[in-house]
Image (cartoon, helix red, strand yellow):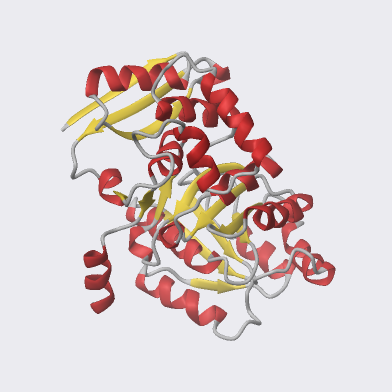
Amino acid sequence: MRLKTFSAATMPEAMAEVRQVLGRDAVIVSTFEGRRGTGVQVTAALEEALPQPEEIQEQAPHPGADGSANPLGEALQFHGLPERLASRLISLAQSMDVEDPEAQLAGALDAGFDFAPLNLMPRQPVMLVGQPGAGKTVTVAKLAARAVMAGKKVRVITTDTIRAGGVAQLRGFTDILNTELEKADAPDILRNAISYAGEDELVLIDSPGTNPYNSIEIRDLKRFLDIEGIEPVLVIAAGGDVAESSDIASAWRPLGIRRVIFTRLDATRRYGAIIAAADATGFILGDVSLSPYVAEGMKVLNPVTMARLLLRQETLTTTLSDNEEKAAQ
């Protein structure tokens, strides 16, 4: 396995170095921004068995694929980005001092959006919020599984105590992880549960599906979010209407949301909603859910993988045969 880290002043320059040293088949493992904006670091690898190339499976070509006369424009149109946003990204991409469209778009995304995964051990409790069916409960389970597999302590709490089967669904996941599930149907109970957590313990909180346009539901949720120290993280299913996804994300901004997790990337071919929602709100992009299977966890989205998704219509998913085997088990 060839694994190498490249440092440069900008993302396009780092990508150009990756192309020169490792070639076009190099897989971007991670990207990091230097302190105080002093450049970027890109770690790339050349081995098909690494997790990322297995997870990003190339599908049938679409507008914007290799060989297109206008790959950026055609790809962004395919994914349904609003014309003004697409034009801005294209302008940013063409200003990059590289010729490769993938590197250009990665540079534009890096310049225009914030990418940062949820820390494995955040300094404050994390409460996932979102509309019914967005995938909050499964995402809580995936984040808990990631921490447990890394040898970290986890405290899982649910405030979703009214929905039929809500507690049972999450308990089914926590039992597998040998982690106790706590219930908190009132802010004081949640506050006490959080206070018992150790300094080295990850606190994950599930919440009821909430309609951001319903003032009563929002008021009830806000009672919990007003507890000092909780970071609310929005969960949205990818693949929805671009304008609607932007409106939904914007409706959550008054609750102090800074970060968004997108789910169900395996069930859609168009990812315009991800970019449009982040553009409308300024939310941080990072973790994405790409499978219904908890063990496969969350994956990190960075400017390079986002550019590849938009340009080459690769999907973050496992092979059909793998899914069939897991379903059978």
- Residue for point 58% across, 18% down: 36
Going 29% across and 29% down the picture, which residue do you hit?
A: 44
Please give the name of the residue rendered at 60% of the width and 44% of the height, measured from the top-left corner.
Answer: 81
Q: Nearer the viewer, residue 224 or 218?
A: 218
Residue 39 located left or right of residue 3: right
Left/right placement of residue 210 relative to residue 86 reads right
Above or below, 56 against 197 in this view is above
Question: Could you say where residue 286 lies in the image, as x and y percent from the top left?
Answer: 51, 43
* Residue at left offset 59%, top offset 34%: 113
Residue 131 pos. (x, y %): 65, 67
Q: Is residue 122 visible?
A: no
Q: Look at the image and tell me whether residue 45 can be seen.
A: yes
Q: Is residue 186 left or right of residue 56?
A: right
**Residue 179 placement (x, y as % from top left):** 42, 68
**Vertical side of 49 occupied by 318: above or below:** below
Q: Please identify the residue farthest to the bottom as the structure is shown.
A: 164
Q: How many marks?
A: 0
Quadrant occupied by the C terminus: bottom left
Q: Residue 192, how many percent across, how many down?
A: 66, 64
Q: Nearer the viewer, residue 152 or 132?
A: 132
Rendered image quadrant of residue 108: top right
Q: Is residue 298 left or right of residue 247?
A: left
